Image (spheres, rainbow, N blue to C red):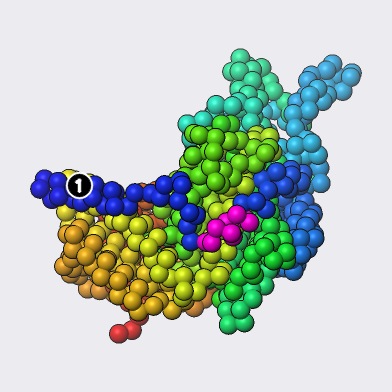
Amino acid sequence: MARIATSTSIVLVILLAAAPLTAQELPPLLPEGVVQALAGELSGTAAKRTVQEITLFHRMRGSRGFRAAADWIRDRAKEAGLAAEILELPADGTVFYGTQRSRPAWEADFAELWEQRAEPLEKGGWVDARRVGAWDSRPVTLAEDSASGEAAAELVDVGAGTAEKDYAGKEVRGKLVLAAAQPGDVYPLAVDRFGSAGIVSYAQNQVTAWWREDENLVRWGHLATFPPPRTFAFMVSLREARGWQERLAKGEAVRLRASVRAGQHAGSYDVVTATILGRDPAVASEEVVLSCHLDHLRPGANDNASGCATILEVARGLAKLIREGRIAAPRRTFRFVWPPEIEGTTALLNARPDLAARARAVIHLDMVGGDAEVTKAVFHVTRSPKSLPTFVNDVGEAFGRFVNDQSYLYAATGQAAYPLADPEGSKRALQAEVVDYTEGSDHQVWAEGSWRVPAIYLNDWPDRFIHTTGDTVANIDATKLLRAGFIAAASAYYLADFDAAKVPALWEVVRRHALERTASALARRDRLAAADQPAEGDNLLRFHFACERAVLASLSSFAEIPAVTRTTALDFLAGLERLSGGKGIAAAAPGSPDEVVVYRRNQQPKGPMSGFGYDYLQDGIAKAGIPAPALLQRTGLWGGGTEYAYEALNLVDGRRTVRQLRDDLSAIYGPVPIAEVGELLRALARIGILARSTP
């Protein structure tokens, strides 16, 4: 208890010392003239108009709709004065880009689902009575990767449709099944095992406080890409499904007719990319990347027309300001990319290793425009993973806090130097949360151990309309787009123009943030001590200060750190570590011989272990005949389960032992058995991702 009391007092001291800047202070990091120029030029209204344009396209990978959207983005970028092109990367199901098996393009030409009614035999028996869904008016009706097919058959309710018990006593062969789960999860039993003619799914959204609340939403559905499905799946609302279920429960027959013309074909990942060249020949080849993902169902307004539109507006605004001489061209080059989500980025970085080598930082925007009153969204400025300590996080955090302060002052008093309120948007405070790394979009590809590019991730979560027909432009807030664009543009401009002269001022920002991060680490250590895990608390603190020193060292990837600043910073961190009780904490000694094994990452293949439509690790262990490692199911402090495995692989560096990997991983997400870490690493070695390092 004494330790807890001491730590708590330290937390209070640190929080007082690290009090946020008041709203009246000057903007952080950038000259006020640059901030004024960015705030004045960027337009949330213009970005929202772009959102509306993008939502007109059903943007499935490799499809005509995706290519039309890509062409539109490229043309707008060129009109804004950028050098822009579309990179076409072949995708046919056999080409691999590192760990990503390319998925064939998927296209639909026609799909309709009709409910039928009985007529006397002399009139034909069954006739179409009501069209339930149609591709041309609502393409979300048809699940992605559906194949062509025709069926006129009874509907059978199979509950979730993912367990054998769901089919007990039911004959579904040649019929259509009504299922609560995603079509891809239903297909193996319903179609492959029991011979259903097709699937009708009313799968609901990700579970949040608003889950299943709106019975009229239709959710985006997916069938597995590999192997190619033999039939189709339709998506309907919960209200539609419940109506059928009530009738079926009364013994009434429900008969549907489905007609589909769709399927996979060889195509390409089409990646729009555009640049604004840097001015300094010494570093102009280095790039600060702004990315999003262009693929999604129609409308897909917040996810992710909002991110795509915002970086287009940032590109337009920066190009115009530089062209007019209102801000100087930065030293480094800006690159903007609009790929298909995750799989497209993995393909891009493997196909164009020069782009990966040039990237110094990434600012990724995915869902940045949701009107919080309607979507219930919380905006996040998300840091890079702890396996990649970087000052880049501090830059994004500084501008995120600045917008928080200014937008709150404006909402509370009606006056602020930088309200960043669009004339056609809201006046609410942004209230962005600065949070540690979570997965969920392309930032995880850039930051993965193959490339280790620091990434700031701007995103909304939750959003009650994500992946449904409710994700429309009506739910987009122009002010939110403006603020996301400002954070992205200010962060990108600062990083692109960063040099040694800016290091001392940046260190002061990093120092304040380090105090707050230390307060959080101490609070976590106290909780571990209270749970009778003091050794885990000590381990956490050891890792925390190693990360803080690595954040300081990361400055040298952009500019030389002045000797005075380096000495001052190291002295500060050493003093903070002593004050926190962390000085002298040593790593745990290894136990068994397995704990001292050291792994290194093989040069190929590059990329994350899981992507969209294909999972390299799951495929590899299935072929090797080994069970799925338990670590894949372990949930991290902030994520949904795969962060442990992601970070475990990221931490592999050819120096850390299995014991050290386990300790660092436990410091990041919470204590984990060393056996689970060793099991995952052995599996990764079996499938060729890792190799044992020689002494």
Instruction: Give the amino acid at mark 1.
Output: Thr
How many numbered marks, from 0 up?
1
Query: Which residues, given as a range, are shown in magenta?
Result: 30-38
Mark 1 element type: helix
Q: Any magenta on residue 32? A: yes
Please identify the residue farthest to the right as the structure is shown.
122
**Residue 495 image position (x, y, % from top left):** 53, 67
Which quadrant holds residue 427? Answer: top right
In the displayed structure, would residue 262 be above or below residue 597?
above
Give me the residue at 32% from left, 52% from top: 18
Secondary structure mainly formed by the magenta segment: helix
Residue 132 visible at all: yes
Horizontal and vertical percent position of residue 200: 66, 34
- Mark 1 — residue? 8
Residue at far bottom of view: 695
Front residue of this view, candidates 595 and 410? 410
